[in-house]
Amino acid sequence: MYLDSIALIQTIPCLAEPGKIIVIGQPSQSLSDVIPYLATLPGIIAYDPENLTLTFRRQSGFMTIYPEKITITQVTDSEEGLRLLKALKDGVNAVWDKRHELKAMTAKKRAVRHLDIWELLPRLNCKQCGESTCLAFAVQLVQGNRDLEECLPLIEVAEYQEKKSALEVLLGT
């Protein structure tokens, strides 16, 4: 076992979603040795091997792991925060136990930005997707609120097929 516990040390209001909180936890020991192995898991949206920071996308919000703390956004209450921290502790220990089967990540990974997506969209601002602009649609794609198939020109117009393929790779769909 790598980690005995992650203590809930603070909660603060979540500005991204009023009524929710950000939970801040402190591991019983530094996560420096395990973070490169955690970075091999699916759902990673950003990893900085120099500073050992790792961000996962959650169903709602994000979880960022630092060597000495964890932040989890858009949490309902302290009770949910404690459950999430316990689940993370169990996950950290499971990854540590399997580390010999994993290859620690050394490469930096950056989250896909809405402008990365926007550059590949048709940029017609046709509103067929239900958004007012292609940029608004790109933001919704990054947040996971929309599907690529909702951009009808991208799906139906042959000249956009290469861009569609690039977007599928970028979004991992």
Image: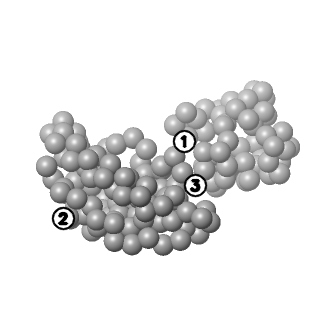
The one nearer the camera, 28 or 117, is 28
Does label 1 or label 2 sit earlier along the sequence? Answer: 2
Whole-number angstrom distance, CA of label 3 to CA of label 1: 10 Å
- Residue sitting at x 32%, y 48%: 87
User: Extreme front residue here?
Assistant: 79
Rendered image coloring scheme: one colour
Q: Which of the numbered marks, if any, corresponds to residue 113?
A: 3
Does label 2 or label 3 sit earlier along the sequence? Answer: 2
The one nearer the camera, 44 or 71, is 71
Tell us which disc is closer to us: 2 or 3: 2
At label 2, which amino acid type do we have?
Gln
> Quick check: marks 2 and 3 in contact, CB under 8 Å?
no
Report if residue 159 is visible in the image: no
Q: Which residue is mark 1?
A: 170
| Residue 170 drawn at (x, y percent) | 54, 41
At label 3, which amino acid type do we have?
Arg
Q: Which of the numbered marks, if any, corresponds to residue 29?
A: 2
| Residue 24 drawn at (x, y percent) | 38, 67
Whole-number angstrom distance, CA of label 1 to CA of label 2: 35 Å
The image quarter containing residue 29 is bottom left
| Residue 135 drawn at (x, y percent) | 73, 53
Q: Is residue 167 left or right of residue 130?
A: left
